[in-house]
């Protein structure tokens, strides 16, 4: 099936985006092995996370509306935020993916979600940190953390996105903040007690 997905991607995303997707797929496998998560599932979710990335805004809105009743105002104003949700629809309808955990990981890779599974966390983090995103000291540090503490990595990834959105004066979806707070709370609980 991987070949079919890659052929479809070659016809539906840019070459630059395809390189990003393959980078996410590989990082998902690496992180899955670090965190005892099924690497095949991680690879599939990583490979399919951006299926709808280049769908026009009207198509994203239409497909999302057909699947769910209420689309929040931030997504209506910024339909590209729906590409994760719509990518899961394409994975299910075009490629027959039925595993709810894979579909959830695809659907949540942009905004995250409180109570995400480890697989969801891996795809969320890999999307932001895969090697094609650059090699700044900050990204390198974040990659190191991603191999050691998945929840701290989700928290850092949210904060990295929030800094960018604030700097560029873009709208912030409240779900990113909810995801960050959840990950922060879980990461703090897993810290060794030094009392």
Image: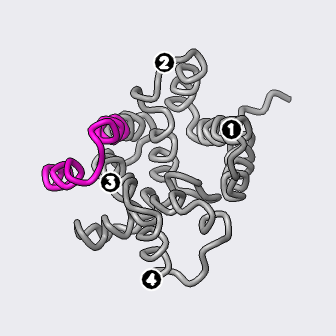
Task: Say which residue label 3 marks.
Answer: 48
| Left or right: 31, with 19 as reference point | right
Number of residue marks: 4
Q: Residue at x 31, y 64 (%)?
A: 91
Q: Residue at x 60, y 65 (%)?
A: 75
Kind of element beneath mark 2: loop
Q: Quadrant of the C terminus?
A: top right
- Bounds of the magenta segment: 1-24
- Residue 157 marker: none
Q: Earlier in the sequence, mark 3 or mark 2?
A: 3
Kind of element beneath mark 1: loop
In this rendering, the answer to whether 136 lies above or below 101 is above
Q: CA distance from mark 3 to mark 2?
A: 24 Å
Task: Say which residue label 4 marks.
Answer: 66
- Residue 135 marker: 2
Is residue 110 visible to us here? yes
Discs 2/1, front: 1
Quadrant of the rendered structure where residue 112 is? bottom right
């Amino acid at each position: 099936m991987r070949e079919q997905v890659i052929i479809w991607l070659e016809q539906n995303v840019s070459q630059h985006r395809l390189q990003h997707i393959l980078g996410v797929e590989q990082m998902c496998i690496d992180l899955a092995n670090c965190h005892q998560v099924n690497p095949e599932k991680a690879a599939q979710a990583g490979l399919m996370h951006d299926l709808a990335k280049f769908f026009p805004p009207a198509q994203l809105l239409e497909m999302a509306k057909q699947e769910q009743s209420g689309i929040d105002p931030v997504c209506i104003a910024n339909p590209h935020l729906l590409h994760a949700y719509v990518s899961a629809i394409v994975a299910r309808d075009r490629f027959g993916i039925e595993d709810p955990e894979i579909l959830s990981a695809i659907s949540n890779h942009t905004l995250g979600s409180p109570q995400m599974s480890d697989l969801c966390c891996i795809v969320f983090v890999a999307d932001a940190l895969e090697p094609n995103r650059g090699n700044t000291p900050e990204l390198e540090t974040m990659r190191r953390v991603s191999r050691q503490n998945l929840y701290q990595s989700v928290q850092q990834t949210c904060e990295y996105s929030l800094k960018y959105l604030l700097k560029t004066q873009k709208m912030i979806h409240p779900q990113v903040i909810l995801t960050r707070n959840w990950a922060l709370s879980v990461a703090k609980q897993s810290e060794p007690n030094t009392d």
